[in-house]
């Protein structure tokens, strides 16, 4: 069954980025010439998704402004022969529709996904976090691979994973997995998910990486999921419940070129911003020179 819907939660408070996020949605922070959320939407379009459901909150109207079709601006740019800029502004394909569902209270990622239940209905869907992109100026085929694995195996859910150093496993949901790969070398079978384990207790070094594909039955599990870490309803807990009920949940590791760029905290945002600036086709060289100069100065 083709997967046509993506749920993109963008309702979070972004408290780790305060005061920056007091008046700016973190999902609109720039990575290169686009906000991170535009990268995510384009990734969904590339994967063949036509309906995007954004879970939003009060105070994030700027997100709807960014994705609203602006014919007057397009006409102006074309009139001034700025056709390339017009293309960059009109990036949404005609086949893509975006709708918005309000999450009244920020009760966690799992709760945000549950808010999409009526909009999604009885069909499988992608969940893509609005504050994380995969790959930078590269052909990131992660979502397409996940969709293939989901379909080939008739899975209940497929989750993306990045291999992280042992020193960082305590920041993520981590996979406990069966040895041996399925579906060629593309995926592994999950036996559990462990939230933020210590390095000593980590069942693996595979950390959840911001992309999921779920059957609609996950909504039933979310309904029954009590608040977990931070008093929030966690999508990870609902997926554990799917595994415990005997569901088939598979993990797809990121390929080497599919690095995850996360703007959710300052250290990862700064690194992502610098890498995006370095990759800019016009300004990257000059940024690189300046950075080399700055780092040489700080060593001397
Ligand atoms: P985070 O886990 O980073 O949560 O969200 P957060 O609340 O935005 O950040 P902090 O911890 O306060 O700094 C990951 C994605 O899920 C969305 C966020 O907008 C972000 O894109 N989210 C999170 C929601 O839509 N609703 C929620 O209740 C929580």
Image (spheres, rainbow, N blue to C red):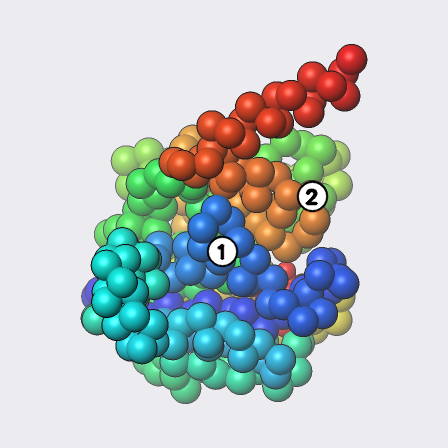
The quadrant of the rendering that contains the N terminus is bottom left
For the residue pair 15 and 164, the one nearer the viewer reads as 15
**Residue 185 place in picture, x, y as percent:** 33, 34
- Work out whether mark 2 precedes mark 1 in sequence or the reverse, and give the earlier one: 1
Q: Is residue 258 above or below residue 40?
A: above
Q: Is residue 185 above or below residue 16?
A: above
Residue at 63 percent of width and 67 percent of height = 24
Number of numbered discs present? Answer: 2
Return the mark for residue 36: 1
- CA distance separating discs 2 and 1: 16 Å
Residue at 60 percent of width and 52 percent of height = 263
The quadrant of the picture showing ligand 1 is bottom right
For the residue pair 172 and 6, the one nearer the viewer reads as 6
Ligand 1 has an atom within 8 Å of the beta carbon of the residue at disc 1: no
Q: Which residue is mark 2?
A: 267
Residue at 23 percent of width and 59 percent of height = 81
Residue at 35 percent of width and 38 percent of height = 138
Q: Quadrant of residue 2?
A: bottom left
Instruction: Find numbered disc 2 in the image and state the secondary structure of the residue it sits on.
Output: helix
């Amino acid at each position: 069954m083709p997967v046509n819907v993506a749920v993109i939660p963008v309702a979070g408070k972004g408290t780790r980025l305060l005061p920056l996020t007091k008046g700016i949605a973190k999902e609109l922070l720039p990575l290169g010439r686009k906000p991170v959320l535009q990268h995510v939407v384009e990734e969904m379009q590339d994967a063949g998704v036509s309906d995007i459901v954004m879970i939003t909150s009060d105070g994030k109207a700027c997100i709807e402004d960014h994705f609203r079709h602006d014919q007057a601006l397009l006409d102006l740019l074309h009139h001034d022969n700025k056709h390339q800029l017009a293309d960059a502004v009109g990036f949404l394909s005609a086949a893509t529709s975006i709708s918005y569902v309000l999450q009244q209270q920020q009760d966690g990622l799992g709760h945000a996904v549950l808010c999409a239940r009526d909009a999604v209905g009885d069909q499988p869907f992608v969940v893509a976090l609005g504050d994380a992109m995969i790959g930078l100026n590269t052909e990131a085929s992660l979502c397409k691979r996940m969709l293939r694995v989901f379909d080939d195996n008739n899975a209940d859910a497929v989750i993306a994973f990045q291999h992280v150093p042992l020193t960082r496993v305590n920041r993520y949901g981590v996979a406990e997995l069966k040895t041996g790969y399925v579906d060629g070398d593309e995926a592994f079978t999950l036996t559990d998910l462990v939230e933020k384990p210590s390095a000593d207790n980590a069942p693996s070094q595979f950390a959840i990486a911001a992309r999921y594909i779920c059957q609609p039955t996950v909504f039933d599990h979310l309904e029954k999921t009590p608040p977990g870490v931070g008093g929030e309803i966690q999508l990870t807990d609902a997926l554990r419940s799917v595994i415990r009920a005997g569901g088939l949940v598979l993990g797809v590791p990121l390929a080497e070129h599919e690095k995850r760029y996360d703007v959710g905290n300052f250290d990862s945002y700064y690194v992502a911003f610098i890498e995006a600036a370095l990759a800019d086709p016009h300004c990257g060289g000059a940024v690189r020179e300046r950075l080399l100069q700055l780092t040489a100065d700080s060593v001397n």
